[in-house]
Every structure is written in structure tokens, then in C-alpha cells.
Amino acid sequence: MKEIDLRSDTVTRPTKEMLQAILTAEVGDDVYKEDPTVNALEEKLARMFGMDEALFFPTGSMANQAGIKLHTQPAEQLICDKWAHVYNYEGGGVSFNSGVSCKLVDGHRGMITAQQVEENINPPDFYHSPLTTLVCLENTTNKGGGACYDIDEMKKIREVCNKHNLGLHLDGARLFNALVAKNEDPKEYGKIFDTISICLSKGLGTPMGSVLIGKKDLMKNAIRVRKVLGGGMRQVGFMAAAGIFALDNNVQRLEEDHRRAKEIGGILKQQSYIGEVEPVETNIIIFYLKDPSTEKEFMARLQEENIRISNMGQGKLRIVTHLDYTEEMHLRFIDVLGNISLKS
Ligand SMILES: *Cc1c(COP(=O)(O)O)cnc(C)c1O
């Protein structure tokens, strides 16, 4: 029985076609900025978002950490949702790499409003509190279950940032999921944000790589920050080639991941063992069992079928659809979900 791995959209492996693009890539030393394929990928993304510059990073965490460093000085504070990846999942890098603290906002599904941003800015003249200099948003939200921001709310947040002289960074690890789900124009994002990180190794299916894009005045320091973080790589055009391939081939198909995720959400809702299923907007399904004590039994039943999902703790279970989750697997998974009956 073939494994069905729905723990994350990071578990994908490169297809034959992507491997072919990797094998035939023209490369050079990217630390000298002499890798033509990395340069092409950076240019492609910068142009797509209507931004000045882009820089390739090994991981999404490093792209976010560099983005935060570009905006802040030690002892300053950034504003983010309490579920933000930059706060919860980057190993405390915000304090380690930039020496800044986070003001956590109690948002909705990982998203915050312009009003909440405004309410959480420390008065700049009150020197007892950290100086607020940056706002970090996440779209789609990871812990928020793949929820997408309303573009108008992000525009309002931009206005608040302008008014209070704050930078605005987007953790866009899954931004393409939002772009496809809401049929948005990437250039709109280029107008709203100062910096955006984009992950190529999630739904887009590459083995590694993220890109930070942004405005010239900020990005001029990005290559130095990347070097400090140890992210300068040599013939990494092989991986950039996978990124270019993914942007050309794997974006619109995210719709399929979204359709399957919605179908799974619908099936889960009908099951007697389910307590709640959060609204499914993109490729992430977060749900709760009716009786949390049946969690072990539920996971064991899936394991028997060679199916893996994530347990996020506090009763939160997570399923993520992706490029390597085929229609055949989908039909089997739905069938399994419909046939589970939990004892307790
Ligand atoms: C995956 C992810 C990242 C980057 O994670 P890496 O594992 O470092 O590539 C950043 N933000 C969000 C919201 C993510 O889901």
C-alpha cells in the first residue's frame, strides 16, 4: 500500500521534468553573483511582483529572518499575529538574529487588522517601551489553516504603516496559494509590502529555496545579511532552475490542491467522530475530533492505512494537500475517512 503523506506540502519530491531542468541548468558561483540561473530566477520574481530586487535563500526561515533584519535595529519591536511563523517556528531567530521582540496580536486565524496594528504601536516618544518599527503579516497563514487575507485589509495596514513610519514585511511562504485562490495580481503585493519572502519548496514542489523580494533601499543590504547568516551558496543555479520550472508549471495547478482540500473538509464534516472542521480556503485542513481522547486511535487507524497527517497539539489535527498527492490517493483517503469508526 503506497504511503499517503499529508503532513505538509514540503514532502514533495522533484518530478522527472523538474530533475531534467535541474540537470541542464547553466550555473556559476552565486556568491560572486555569477550564477545565470539564480539571477534569472531573482529577476523573474522581482518582475512578477513589480518589485526592484530579489535574492535567493536556502530556506524560508532565513529569508524571513533577513527580511526582519533589514527593517530593524536591536531592542526594537515588531508586530505580528500570535500564531505567526516568524514567532513560533523559526527557533527564536527574531531575538537571536535581529535582537528584536514581538508584540503578539490576538488575530483571527493568524490574520490581524489595521486597527489592531494601530492599537499595538508603542508611543515612539515613550522611551520605556521598545520602539515599534515593523509589521509582519503571513499569507496564507500556516497555523491559521491556510486562510487568506483580504487585500483591502492589507492596504489599510499599509496606510497605518505609512502614517507611523513602520516597515511592512510579508511572510509569503504560501503566497502563491493565496494568489491562485483569490485570483489576485502579484503586482498588488509589490505595491503594499516593502519586503516579501516566497517559498519554492512548499506547494511549488522544489527541493529547496526561498526568495526575498523588496524595495531597492532595503535590499541593498540583503546580500550582506545573507552572508552573515551563512546563506551565500555557490552553484545553486541547479536549485534555482527547479524554482523557475515550478513558477512556469506548478502555480495554476495549486487549484487542484485546493479542490481536494475542500473535498476532504466536506467529507470530514459528515463523520460522526469529528468535532469541528475549520473553513478550508486553500490546501490546509485543520480539524478537531469530537472526543479528543480518541486521537491516538484515529491516528493509529490512519497509520494502518499507511496515511500520515500532523498532530499540532491541543486537539488540533492538520492535513495538507500538495503536488505529490494524486487523485488516486485522494479517492482512497476519502474512502478511508468514511470508513473509520472510533470506539470511544
Ligand atoms: C514553511 C514556512 C516558512 C519557511 O520555513 P522553512 O522550513 O525555513 O523553509 C515560513 N513561513 C511560513 C508561514 C511557513 O509555512
Image: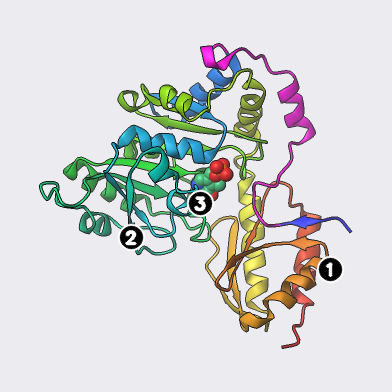
- Label whose residue precedes the other's in the sequence (1 or 3): 3
* Residue at the image position 33 percent from the left and 40 percent from the top: 192
Is residue 187 visible in the rendered image? The answer is: no
- Residues drawn in magenta: 6-34
Q: Is mark 3 within 8 Å of ligand 1?
A: yes
As for residue 122 lying within the magenta part, the answer is: no
Q: What residue is disc 2 on?
A: 105
- Please tell me how crowded label 3 is: few (under 14), some (14-19), or many (20+) other residues with Cα within 10 Å: few
Residue type marked 1 = Glu
Residue type marked 3 = Tyr
Q: Are marks 1 and 3 in contact (CB under 8 Å)?
A: no
User: In the rendered image of this protein, does residue 70 appear above or below residue 343?
Assistant: above
* Residue at the image position 82 percent from the left and 56 percent from the top: 3
- Label whose residue precedes the other's in the sequence (3 or 2): 3
User: In the rendered image of this protein, does residue 142 appear above or below residue 206?
Assistant: below
Q: CA distance from mark 1 to mark 3?
A: 30 Å
Can you name the residue that lies furthest to the right here?
1
Q: Secondary structure at mark 1?
A: helix
Q: Is mark 1 within 8 Å of ligand 1?
A: no
Q: Is mark 2 within 8 Å of ligand 1?
A: no
- The residue closer to the viewer here, 262 or 147, is 147
> Residue 283's quadrant in the figure?
bottom right
Can you name the residue that lies furthest to the bottom here?
344
Q: What residue is disc 1 on?
A: 304
Q: Secondary structure at mark 2?
A: strand
Q: What residue is disc 3 on?
A: 89
Q: Secondary structure at mark 3?
A: loop
Q: CA distance from mark 2 to mark 1?
A: 40 Å
Question: If the image is split into quadrants, where does the N terminus sit?
Answer: bottom right
* Number of the label disc, if any, that sits on residue 186: none
Residue 21 location, x and y as percent? 72, 24
